[in-house]
Amino acid sequence: MQLPRRFLPTISSLRALEALDRLGSASAAAEELSLTQGAVSRQLQALEAQLGISLVQRDRKKLHLTPEAEIYAREIRKALDQISQSTLRVQTAPMAGSLNLAILPAFGMRWLMPRLPEFARRHPDVTINMTTRLQPFSFSSEDIDAAIHFGTARWPGTESLLLKHEQLLPVCSPDLVSAGTVVGAQEILEMPLLHIQTRPQAWRDWFETQGVSVAAEDMSGTMYDQFSTITQAAQHGFGVALMPDYLVEQDIATGRLTALQSQPSEAKGAYYLVWPQTKTRDPALQKFRTWLEGQAQPEDPLPR
């Protein structure tokens, strides 16, 4: 789609506006941009002429943005940052590019990391930059090409690849329940429950699969932000944690934790690689996705 020129100001004029808004003075903006104050003023005048609106209030040679211009500057700052990041990515990985991947800490470390050396050997021209994300985010507002996500595949405007189903076990310290003791769901409901912030409905869903009706007041308990911290809480006797079996297998084997059920039950959600539809043809993402298809074996055990 071809936009009219008045909707596409020059980068130099937008940078002048953004710098004036962020730094608060024309002199500071000029110093950062390696321009004279007069050149900054001319850039802003050209932008006003192109847009047909007033952006700058001039008071005794001092420049101040109008309230509307301040909002505009904050909005274009995101676009300028995106242009800068995209340019850096092209310069640092000109052949196949790079992939900015958001991961969940526990699953990323236990499932993805042991597999990544193979991908690096197969595709040395692709750079994977990883960042952890525990809270919801938007692909449109962050420089993320794909994410490893737990839940369902229903994420608007995206496509997905199933990586792994999850099996859950209620676990606690052997000081609370002797190892090898099977505890029924109704009895577990009477014990202190440990919750994880990213899955506030996990216990309720689990009790539902066990045929136990749960009232809101029965779901009280302490809250933790990551599996690593909730595991420590369970080991020290704070209560019962509902954990993915692959994360507590070693703790159960060494006696640091005891499982309250003999068999795990499948969680409602699963792990997916998710990417925006606009990125589907990205070369780096295509290589990563194709490789992951060979690793996505939902019924196979996770590497230890």
Image (cartoon, grey):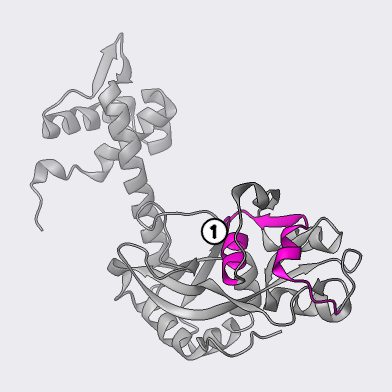
Residue 102, given in percent of the width and then of the height, sits at 50, 64
Q: Is residue 261 left or right of residue 199?
A: right
Q: Residue at x 62, y 61 (%)?
A: 203
Q: Is residue 76 highlighted in magenta?
A: no
Residue 264, given in percent of the width and then of the height, sits at 67, 79
Quadrant that contains the C terminus: bottom right
Q: Secondary structure at mark 1?
A: loop
Asked if residue 96 can be seen in this view, the reply is no
Asked if residue 3 can be seen in this view, the reply is yes
Type of amino acid at the residue the image marks with label 1: Arg
Residue 109 location, quadrant: bottom right
Q: Residue at x 77, y 69 (%)?
A: 171
Q: Is residue 203 highlighted in magenta?
A: yes
Residue 229 location, quadrant: bottom right
Quadrant that contains the N terminus: bottom left
Residue 143, given in percent of the width and then of the height, sits at 42, 57
Does 143 appear above or below 94? above
Does 137 appear above or below 249? above
- Residue at the disc numbered 1: 133
Q: Residue at x 59, y 90 (%)?
A: 300
Residue 132, given in percent of the width and then of the height, sits at 57, 61
Residue range highlighted in magenta = 180-209
